[in-house]
Image: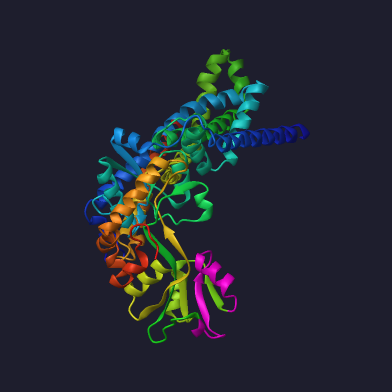
């Protein structure tokens, strides 16, 4: 124990601070994921449609988000809006905006991909059975799309959770930052604390991401039946 | 096929354009004179809270203890500023890379995050009087102490970490000294302990701490090269707060405040011997 430096986590309120940091990261990523999934579904449906102008606009949006590092987006939204418009967004709002902006674009593209991956014959067969367009979408296309989407969106959510470590750059103290603080504060007394503390942080990320993965696997299985 | 390519290219161009516009917007916004980004001393007092940007993971200058409270040499000074202004302190955890941004957008009133004064930075922010010295230092084994650079023979090698001030300073001013470069602190430390080089050059705070933590090493040269200072910084143009800080630092000099600060926060790391090397009292560099 001593050599791994896990003991520093039991000094004072260190463990509670780490959990608090985890809650900050989880809060930002879960709110952002919820917003992203909701808006992303709309965006994906529009993108899969036939309107060239809408497709073009979303294409630009998606490419912008893709080539822009999340760190740059965070700086633009947190510091940039203050400089240009004088808005004083809280760091948490800024973080949620950035991760939703990013997540929506990625989710939209996933939904678009899932929608167009449904073979044309599915539409044709459904129509041949006499279903109207609404029913075709609701009973044939959507369930297949959602099933294809689950593993992809889980991947996106876990990526959002992991990327929240960047919010320390706009002054938010999340789990990884707390870990660094604990390691540094004990640099002299337990120089090896980094190993133990980061191992615990790894476990914490795992504990957050794992149930999401399990829930997705369960849904996937259930809806496959 | 061709159509797809054209579409992709145009999308890329459009996105690129959008980014340029966004970035240009950020750049030009900083010069907006209509709304000053900073708060004057009166405005701070009226609001009852001062925002101070400090490091939260740079022990012993700015860190958070196991009870979640900010501590360290910079933080000790911050508490005093809050007390003398009669306001509460909201500590903001800053990183080396965003300190200037925080001041320019007025998201903090003062940066007290071990901010080294440089001419480039002084164009972006206003520095108050200094409260600490930094220079380079050279540590060597106690059985072969190097007290002057002349002692370094033509075949001897000095260990440095790539990208540090020590590397640039020695290369520029002493090109005849052979350097052994390492990418990380840990690698340089191991190499030095294995005696791959006769000495190790780094920021003096780093080498002093190393010599105190590790038996058998002496800092032969505690202060080398250009003396840099560490000072509080405020948003460019915030004269009200700048003058207040300067007066405060001068006044604190009379009660030897920063020596007391050193003894409370840095003594364990650097020992008594370096107090006068590191501390700047009353804003006057000796």
For residue A210, say whether it is visible.
Answer: no
Q: Is residue B86 above or below residue B96?
A: above
Residue at horizontal 27%, vertical 57%?
B254
Q: Which residue occupies the foreground of this view, B139 or B283?
A: B283
For residue A124, say whether it is visible.
Answer: yes
Residue at horizontal 55%, vertical 75%?
B179
Q: Which residue occupies the foreground of this view, B198 or B196?
A: B198
* Residue B213 x %, y %: 32, 72
Quadrant of the drawing holding the C terminus of chain A: top left
Which range is magenta?
A: B150-176
Q: How many marks?
A: 0
Task: Please give left or right for residue B53 compared with residue B69 in the image.
Answer: right
Residue at horizontal 59%, vertical 29%?
A118
* Residue B74 x %, y %: 33, 54
Residue at horizontal 64%, vertical 34%?
B15
Q: Residue furthest right?
A: B2
Q: Is residue A125 above or below residue B9?
A: above
């Amino acid at each position: 124990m001593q050599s791994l430096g896990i003991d520093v986590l039991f000094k004072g309120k260190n463990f509670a601070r780490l959990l608090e940091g985890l809650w900050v990261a989880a809060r930002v990523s879960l709110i952002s994921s919820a917003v992203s999934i909701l808006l992303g579904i709309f965006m994906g449906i529009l993108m899969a449609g036939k309107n060239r102008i809408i497709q073009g606009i979303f294409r630009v949006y998606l490419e912008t988000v893709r080539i822009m590092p999340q760190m740059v987006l965070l700086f633009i939204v947190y510091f940039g809006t203050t400089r240009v418009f004088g808005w004083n967004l809280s760091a948490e709002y800024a973080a949620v905006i950035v991760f939703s902006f990013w997540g929506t674009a990625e989710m939209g593209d996933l939904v678009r991909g899932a929608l167009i991956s449904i073979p044309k014959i599915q539409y044709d067969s459904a129509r041949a059975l006499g279903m109207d367009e609404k029913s075709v979408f609701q009973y044939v296309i959507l369930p297949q799309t959602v099933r294809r989407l689950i593993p992809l969106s889980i991947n996106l959510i876990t990526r959002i959770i992991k990327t929240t470590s960047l919010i320390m750059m706009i002054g938010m103290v999340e789990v990884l930052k707390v870990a660094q603080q604990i390691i540094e504060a004990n640099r002299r007394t337990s120089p090896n604390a980094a190993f133990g503390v980061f191992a615990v942080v790894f476990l914490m990320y795992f504990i957050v991401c794992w149930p999401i993965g399990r829930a997705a696997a369960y849904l996937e299985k259930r809806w496959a039946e | 096929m061709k159509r797809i390519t054209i579409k992709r290219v145009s999308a890329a161009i459009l996105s690129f354009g959008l980014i340029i516009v966004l970035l240009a917007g950020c750049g030009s916004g900083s010069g907006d004179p209509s709304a000053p980004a900073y708060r004057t001393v009166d405005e701070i007092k009226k609001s009852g809270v001062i925002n101070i940007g400090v490091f939260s993971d740079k022990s012993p200058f700015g860190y958070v203890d196991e009870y979640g409270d900010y501590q360290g040499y910079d933080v000790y000074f911050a508490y005093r500023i809050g007390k003398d202004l009669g306001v509460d302190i909201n500590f903001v955890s800053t990183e080396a890379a965003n300190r200037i941004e925080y001041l320019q957008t007025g998201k903090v009133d003062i940066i007290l995050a071990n901010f080294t004064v440089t001419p480039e930075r002084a164009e972006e922010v206003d520095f108050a009087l200094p409260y600490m010295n930094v220079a380079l230092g050279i540590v060597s084994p106690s059985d072969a102490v190097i007290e002057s650079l002349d002692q370094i023979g033509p075949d001897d090698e000095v260990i440095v970490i790539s990208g540090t001030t020590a590397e640039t300073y020695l290369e520029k001013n002493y090109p005849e000294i052979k350097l052994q470069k390492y990418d990380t602190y840990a690698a340089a430390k191991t190499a030095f302990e294995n005696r791959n080089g006769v000495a190790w050059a780094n920021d003096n705070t780093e080498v002093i701490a190393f010599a105190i933590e590790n038996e058998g090493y002496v800092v032969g040269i505690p202060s080398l090269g250009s003396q840099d200072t560490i000072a509080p910084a405020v948003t460019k143009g915030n004269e009200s707060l700048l003058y207040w800080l300067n007066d405060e630092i001068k006044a604190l000099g009379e009660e030897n405040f920063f020596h007391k600060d050193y003894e409370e926060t840095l003594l364990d790391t650097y020992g008594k011997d370096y107090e006068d090397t590191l501390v700047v009292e009353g804003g006057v560099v000796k």
